[in-house]
Image (tube, rainbow, N blue to C red):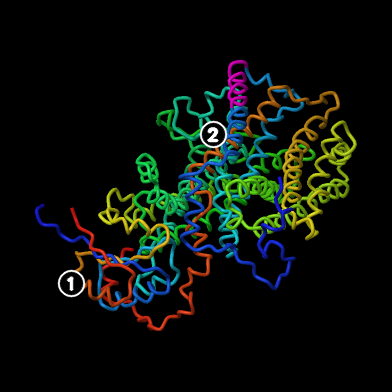
Amino acid sequence: MSEQKPYALIAEFDSVATIMRAAEKVRDADYMIWDVHSPMPIHGINKSMGLPPTILPWITLVHGLAGAVFGLLMCWWMNATTVPGLSPSVQGYEFMISGKPTFSLPANIPIIFETTVLFAAIGTVLGMLGLNKLPMLYNPLSKSRRFLRATSDRFFIVIEAEDKHFELEKTKAFLESLGPTAIEVVIED
Amino acid sequence: MSTTTDTASLSQWELQPNNPSERVPLVLGDNDFTSVTDTVTELALRRTPQMWYVAFACSLALLSILIVTVGYLLTTGVGVWGNNNAVSWGFPIVNFVFWVGIGHAGTLISAILFLLRQNWRTGINRFAEAMTIFAVCCAGLFPGIHVGRIWLAYWLAPYPNELGMWPQARSPLLWDVFAVSTYATVSLMFWYMGMIPDLATLRDRAKNRFAQVAYGIFALGWNGSNRHWLRFEKAYLLLAALATPLVLSVHSVVSFDFATSQLPGWHTTIFPPYFVAGAVFGGFAMVLVLSIPAREWFGLRNLITHRHIENMAKVMLGTGMIVAYAYSVEFFTAWYSKHHYEQFVFMNRPMGPYWWAFWLMVCCNVVAPQALWFSWIRQRVWMIFLVAVLVNIGMWFERFVIVVTSLHRDFLPSSWAMFSPTWVDLLMLLGSFGLFFTLFLLFCRYLPMVAMAEVKTVMPQAHGEEHGVRFDYQPDPDTPEELRRGHWFT
């Protein structure tokens, strides 16, 4: 713990236009473990950063289908099954009401629809948090006073020391060439 | 309220007459990212307007009325309501349908307008979503307490039990349980997820330790990473796409409670679209009732602009016309069906003992919104406010007319009876407003009332072309192969 290891280099920018151009140059310099931080989503930055599309819609689809199957099986089990020998607590409850069939798909569609939406929505939110590795309990970047403005009005490029192209002086010079308003070294602890 | 009468303080955009060829900016004044953040975080972190304390004291008083009446109901029994054998569904169901309807505008603004690329929603969506959550809380209260033995309300949920009984999945009342609980859950997730970046802003700007920790916990460590933003926006889009059919389904399902019965006046196929339109109509009226004072008190006139208010007024006018059409179709169908029970109900509404409720509904819901055709009236915020208040009253009476006038005189004249609310009914309705406003004021005080990150995306500075700077560096069209390998699971 004696010597202070750098965690990352951060470069501050003050507009969307400059950070988008800077991001393209970082991408083309083959850095891998780096990021752009901004107070709002920058549309088109995924291209500038070279980010592939997210798999989140597939997660939503899978959860939605699971919800539909769950809703269908639940309605069927609850009102249309009698399994001999099964404990009454998990036994279905076949209740004949005004001559209607005990299982009828149209009557169960509202519930199936709701479980589909519910599962898909929960899957989407948890999927987003999971892919983003949130909640993040601690982040060395938050020690930088300057970096606090990333959630209000400033834009940052962060290149982490773990990146294989990272060399403190060389990367610093590279970031300086992008025209930032400030550069800071964040120390790991 | 002196809103637009002092013309000196208005910007040029607010005074401009309607010109459809002119695109009014969504954020007025000399605002940049810094000032938007300052305006919104100021409310939560520093200054509390005097009016907030006054309003909060009033709504706490109303909330205590609700607590006392619910306590009285639980200790005495549901007989304290004015319901009787003929009118078995009285105020609790009227209030339930009213409050569920209020919630719809929030989801409509946040989901449907989002999918339709209506950028003007960004100033008001957070606000409206919060309103949805709190309205659904109020709505959930009434069916919860009207079951009689409230301590057995969990029987509505499907779970294995020793009684060997499951809920009846063919019953619209169970559909309601699923629809409303799904709606509440999805709305809450939508609201909270959308708020995460703004909570992070509050965390980073809070000065005292307690606020930093509290906002920090709910911000989940958000730091504005664009890898995160990419998935966040996709998740937001997906949730909007899921919430859109959901919002249409919820009030349709609520209308099934009525429409699948055989009671004249309820047994109508127009009920699902009619209820949805009515919900949006009443919900937009409530958004206006809340946002007009809030933008004055909290100094948000540059973020919630006159254009927002006017657009909402137009939506209210449009949905009001759908509701008016639905009223007339009901009468037409009754006449055309030659079904004499049905015809009797529709004669009984305007001319029977509850004629006053019917005509109050027509005046508030059909006549009053017509004023919004005139731009002279839409230019005056207090007039829009007045119409919105009338619409809220009218929409409550609409549900009263549907529930009570159909039940009190049905097939058998020997079982006809009148319904009159008891003091518990009236105080409970009043108290539910206390619950709603208390939650809403707490939200205004402690949470980001305007979606900062979203407002920033609709500002010209967000498009990377400010000061005439355009991209001179040509992007590499292919994602580097190495990058793709490193982040395939993204």
Q: Which residue is mark 2?
A: B167
Q: Position of residue B482 (x, y in %)?
A: 25, 74
Residue B342, picture quadrant? top right
What stretch of residues is rendered in magenta? B64-76
Q: Residues within 10 Å of mark 1 (few under 14, many from 20)?
A: few
Neighbor class of circle 2 (other Cα within 10 Å; few <14, some 14-19, many 20+) is some
Foreground disc of the pair 2, 1? 1
Q: Position of residue B431 (x, y in %)?
A: 64, 29
Q: Nearer the viewer, residue A153 or B138?
A: A153
Mark linked to residue A169: 1
Judged from this view, the residue extending furthest toward the left is A2
Q: Quadrant of residue B390?
A: top right
**Looking at this view, is B168 or B183 the one in front?**
B183
Task: Report, in whole angstroms, how far the alpha carbon at label 2 lies from the one at label 1.
Answer: 68 Å
Picture quarter with the N terminus of chain B: top right
Main secondary-structure element of the magenta-colored stretch: helix
Q: Is residue B72 magenta?
A: yes
Residue B335 x %, y % = 88, 47
Q: Residue at x 25, y 70 (%)?
A: A32
Relative vertical location of residue A128 with respect to residue B157 in this rendering, above or below? below
Amino acid, disc 2:
Pro
User: Quick one: SS at disc 1?
Assistant: helix
* Label 2 and label 1 in one chain: no
The chain identifier of the residue carrying mark 2 reads B
Task: Between residue B112 and residue A99, name the one nearer to us.
Answer: B112
Amino acid at dot 1: Glu
Is residue B107 rendered to the left or right of residue B84? left
State whether residue B127 appears in this view: yes
Total tally of numbered discs in the picture: 2
Question: Vertically, is B365 above or below A180?
Answer: above
Left or right placement of residue B354 versus residue B156 in this view: right
